[in-house]
């Protein structure tokens, strides 16, 4: 598996992703297709724990079950290959690392440096797979990024009794890592007779640059790139959100503008709100945290915070959140209060998510 910080990030990603997703396994029984529900989250947690404890055979069995529920999961296939390699099974390690790359795994550097494969690297069948992968990906060149203009999407919903002659608050929703605008727009259904226009833009990057096609699993940031590319990407996210606000406001009657971010989306919601208090009335942060101030890759400055004291803030966090600890929210509360912000804070019984009653509370707060 992965070592050091990279391994920690991957383990965290697997736990969070597994807690959100559930897949089905189809079994052909004559003409009837039978589906067996697989609880990915608990299986991935068990696999991770077994791996960390050195029980590689046990971890492999859990990963096999997860892979059966979705054979396109390149990261799970990679982890399964690691488990077999650590048991000295070169044939199965080669088989599943091939499966991982065939299904979109792209972290070549990690693969050739991963010490998990050391027990089998000299085996003929594994050496052949290494050579095949090296030759195959030599031709694809190096991944880099350029800032360029394009048409970017968003989804929009209106109150059931929408009246074009009236003005409504505009709420921009930014989902968490691995989400999509299509998924996040459905949170509107949680609201009781909402009197706001709700818009969800779309993060422009696949969830991982080391995995191929990922359907609607998107992220707001690019990582594992240089500092300047990271900062440029974040600046472009801000530009995208502000242009979305401008376009929607030019087509519909909009009063105050609010940003609502969940998890990773909250990071950008706080940043964009703090940098643009003249355009954005307030920010709702669900189960998130704030970008570091004055850090190397951060676009958020102390001056931004100091000049945004009129920004209204609503922070909500589940007390049982395993992805981002509630302590993070409590520290953020203390920080904003020390800076003199107008802050409403809410802890709820629950995990990493947007709870319906708290979302209603936040939207009602918007209109106070």
Image (cartoon, grey):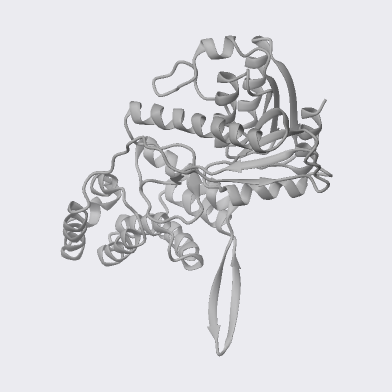
Residue 200 horizontal/vertical position (percent): 61, 42
- Is 23 above or below relative to 366? below
Residue 67 appears at what percent x and percent y?
Answer: 46, 64
Q: Is residue 281 left or right of residue 269?
A: right
Q: Give the quadrant of the C terminus.
A: top right
At 60% from the left and 72% from the top, the residue drawn is 36
Q: Is residue 61 left or right of residue 311?
A: left
In this rendering, is residue 295 above or below 353? above
Residue 324 visible in the picture? no
The answer to whether 198 is drawn above or below residue 120 in the figure is above
Residue located 37% across and 39% down the image: 6
Q: Quadrant of residue 128?
A: bottom left
Q: Residue at x 54, y 32 (%)?
A: 243
Whether residue 116 is visible, yes or no, is yes
Q: Position of residue 101 (x, y in %)?
A: 31, 58
Q: In the rendered view, tell whether residue 20 sits above or below residue 66.
A: above
């Amino acid at each position: 598996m992965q070592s050091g910080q990279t391994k920690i990030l991957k383990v965290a990603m697997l736990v969070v992703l597994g807690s959100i997703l559930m897949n089905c396994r189809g079994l052909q029984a004559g003409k009837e297709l039978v589906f067996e529900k697989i609880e990915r989250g608990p299986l991935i947690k068990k696999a991770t724990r077994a791996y960390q404890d050195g029980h590689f055979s046990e971890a492999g069995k859990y990963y096999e079950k997860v892979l059966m529920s979705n054979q396109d999961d390149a990261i799970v296939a990679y982890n399964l290959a690691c488990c077999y390699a650590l048991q000295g099974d070169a044939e199965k390690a080669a088989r599943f690392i091939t499966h991982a790359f065939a299904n979109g795994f792209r972290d070549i550097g990690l693969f050739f440096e991963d010490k998990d494969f050391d027990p089998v690297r000299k085996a003929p069948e594994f050496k052949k797979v290494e050579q095949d992968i090296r030759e195959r990906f030599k031709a694809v060149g190096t991944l880099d990024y350029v800032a360029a203009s394009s048409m970017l999407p968003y989804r929009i919903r209106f109150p059931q009794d929408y009246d074009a002659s009236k003005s409504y608050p505009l709420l921009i929703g930014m989902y968490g890592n691995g989400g999509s605008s299509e998924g996040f727009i459905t949170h509107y259904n949680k609201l009781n007779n909402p009197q706001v226009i709700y818009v969800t833009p779309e993060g422009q990057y696949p969830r991982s640059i080391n995995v191929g096609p990922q359907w609607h699993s998107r992220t707001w940031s690019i990582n594992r790139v240089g500092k300047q590319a990271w900062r440029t990407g974040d600046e472009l996210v801000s530009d995208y959100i502000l242009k979305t606000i401008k376009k929607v406001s030019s087509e519909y009657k909009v009063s105050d503008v609010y940003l609502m971010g969940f998890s990773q989306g909250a990071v950008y919601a706080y940043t964009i709100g703090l940098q643009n208090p003249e355009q954005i009335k307030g920010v709702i942060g669900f189960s998130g945290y704030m970008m570091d101030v004055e850090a190397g890759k951060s676009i958020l400055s102390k001056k931004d915070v100091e000049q945004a004291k009129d920004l209204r803030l609503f922070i909500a966090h589940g007390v049982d959140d395993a992805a981002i600890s509630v302590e993070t929210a409590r520290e953020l509360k203390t920080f904003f209060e020390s800076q003199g912000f107008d802050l409403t804070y809410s802890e709820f019984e629950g995990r990493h998510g947007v709870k319906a009653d708290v979302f209603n509370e936040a939207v009602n707060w918007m209109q106070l």
